[in-house]
Amino acid sequence: MYSISQLQDLVNKHIAEKEYPNNPSELYEPIRYIMSLGGKRLRPALLLMACNLFDGSVLKALDPALAIEVFHNFTLMHDDIMDKAPLRRGKPTVHAKWNESIAILSGDVMLVKAYELIMSVNDSVLRDVLRVFNETATGVCEGQQIDMNFEALDGVTIAEYLEMIRLKTAVLLAGSLEIGALIGNAPKDQAQLLYQFGENLGLAFQLQDDILDVYGDPHKFGKQVGGDILSNKKTFLLIKALELAENLEEEELNYWLNAEDFDADTKVRAVTDIYNQLGVRQLAEEQMNDFAEKALSALACVEASSEKKDQLKTFAEELLVREN
């Protein structure tokens, strides 16, 4: 049985060995560049773990695993353009290093390459794998559009927010697991249980991200703490605070949401104080734990060796016990 780190190493080695044409260099060099920026390779590792869970060949699943990572980075490349982000993992984004037109076209080719890689699966499961991949890819795009729509909306509900993060974040984890299970010749009902595991794990992971953005240690979290507050991003914490706030708390929260000229540290402290008064961190943690429990319940129903399921359980626990 492979360890998680061994699977991540296999993915990184496969990425490094992947060859792309040299010409036109403006089309293919950005792909090499963004794929070399690193990352935890969580999604392809999950695909390989799911395949291994049912005694499928991990080595034969490497191309589909790479397809997931190429697709993920394609979405990041286009997201960076939409967000006008200058950096990705501490390095210039593709559109900043080249230009937006190159980033768009290079990203388009990445999507095509992802399909080429996914087509390497056995013909007996190809149709099912493509169905899951298509549904996953569509869901990610829908989630991104809904997230952008939220920027102009005032009345976003918790249910709407959870559906957005399900699409934008959770379905790619879930789809990776289901595809891996199908490649490993798992029965469809077992593959679906792994989808449910990944979907709930992804929801819990994103809620934890919301919490850590406000309460995390920036040196351990790896991001600017308070970034969501400064950008008025509609997270679980903000939506729940708007739902619960009354009188002075409501007035103060609306003041900071509408303020155009402010000191960043002061705004972060003030909004965090409101969150503390309303107890929204505890509510977010309760919701996160609920999704984590649902994920583990789905995994418990999977008919596979306990040892291999424990590996996925450990992966989930490590994913949800990030430093704060």
Image: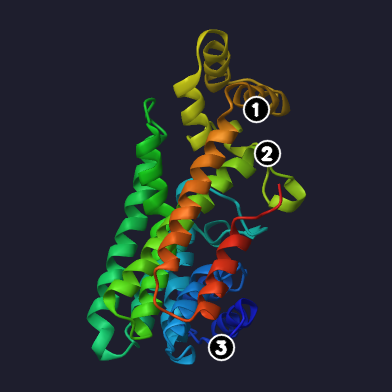
The residue that mark 3 highlights is 17
**How is the structure coloured here?**
rainbow
| Image point (58%, 72%), residue name | 33
* Residue 187: percent from left, percent from top: 29, 80
Is 129 displayed left or right of 156 in the figure?
A: left
What amino acid type should be assigned to the residue bearing mark 2? Tyr
Badge 1 marks a residue whose secondary structure is helix
* Residue 243: percent from left, percent from top: 44, 23
Front position among marks 2 and 3: 2
Front position among marks 1 and 3: 1
The residue that mark 2 highlights is 215
Please report whichever mark, 2 or 3, sits nearer to the chain's N-terminal start.
Answer: 3
Check the image and name the residue furthest to the right.
219
**Which residue occupies the foreground of this view, 125 or 12?**
125
Q: In which quarter of the image is residue 10?
A: bottom right
What amino acid type should be assigned to the residue bearing mark 1? Thr
Please report whichever mark, 1 or 3, sits nearer to the chain's N-terminal start.
Answer: 3
**Residue 226 visible in rendering:** yes
Measure the alpha-carbon separation of dots 1 and 3: 46 Å
Badge 3 marks a residue whose secondary structure is helix
Measure the alpha-carbon separation of dots 1 and 2: 8 Å
The residue that mark 1 highlights is 272
Quarter holding the N terminus is: bottom right
| Image point (34%, 87%), residue name | 121
* Residue 11: percent from left, percent from top: 55, 81
Please report whichever mark, 1 or 2, sits nearer to the chain's N-terminal start.
Answer: 2
- Is 101 situated above or below 232? below
* Residue 294: percent from left, percent from top: 43, 55
Is 278 displayed left or right of 324 in the figure?
A: left
**Residue 26 visible in rendering:** no
- Is 295 situated above or below 233? below
